[in-house]
Image: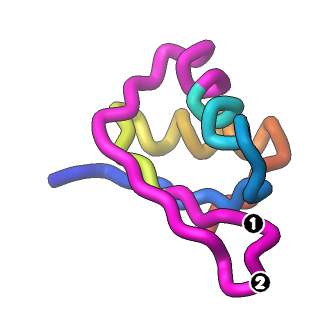
Amino acid sequence: MLQTISVLVENTPGALGDVAQHLRDAHINITCGYCTPSREGKRAIVVLSVSDVKKAQEVLRGESLDEI
């Protein structure tokens, strides 16, 4: 079964790259992902399948990214 996390990021170029960099720095692999703009359009919803969900949640919370 795939383990996934969902986060809200700014809907700007490079925002997904920032998330990926934080996970890379923590040695967490991304195996699959997709994103869609939020209803208001200012943010994007990103769903990622990762190698370690619990660690990814901790890393992204530490970077003040909103988890859904």
Q: Give the range drawn in magenta.
A: 21-46
Residue 18 figure quarter: top right
- Closer to us: 16 or 54: 16
Q: In which quarter of the image is the C terminus?
A: bottom right
Decide: few, some or many residues near mark 1? Use Cα within 10 Å; few <14, some 14-19, many ≥20.
some
Residue at x 53%, y 60% (from the top left corner): 6
Q: Looking at the image, which residue sits at the far front?
A: 13
Residue 41 on the magenta span: yes
The amino acid on which the numbered mark 1 sits, given as a three-letter code, is Arg
Q: Looking at the image, which residue sits at the far bottom?
A: 39
Whole-Å distance between the Cαs marked 1 and 2? 7 Å
Marks 1 and 2 close (CB-CB < 8 Å): yes
Residue 54 on the magenta span: no
Decide: few, some or many residues near mark 2? Use Cα within 10 Å; few <14, some 14-19, many ≥20.
few
- Where is residue 31 drawn, in percent x and y? 29, 35
Tell me if 30 is positioned left or right of 20 in this view. Answer: left
Tell me if 28 is positioned left or right of 59 in this view. Answer: left
Q: Looking at the image, which residue sits at the far left?
A: 1
The amino acid on which the numbered mark 2 sits, given as a three-letter code, is Glu
- Where is residue 27 drawn, in percent x and y? 49, 15
- Identify the mark at residue 40; answer none if there is no mark: 2
Residue 63 figure quarter: top right
- Where is residue 41 drawn, in percent x and y? 74, 76
Residue identifier under label 1: 43
Residue at x 62%, y 41% (from the top left corner): 16
| SS class, disc 2 | loop
- Where is residue 66 drawn, in percent x and y? 74, 59
Residue at x 15%, y 53% (from the top left corner): 1
Q: Number of marks in the image? A: 2
- Closer to us: 54 or 64: 64
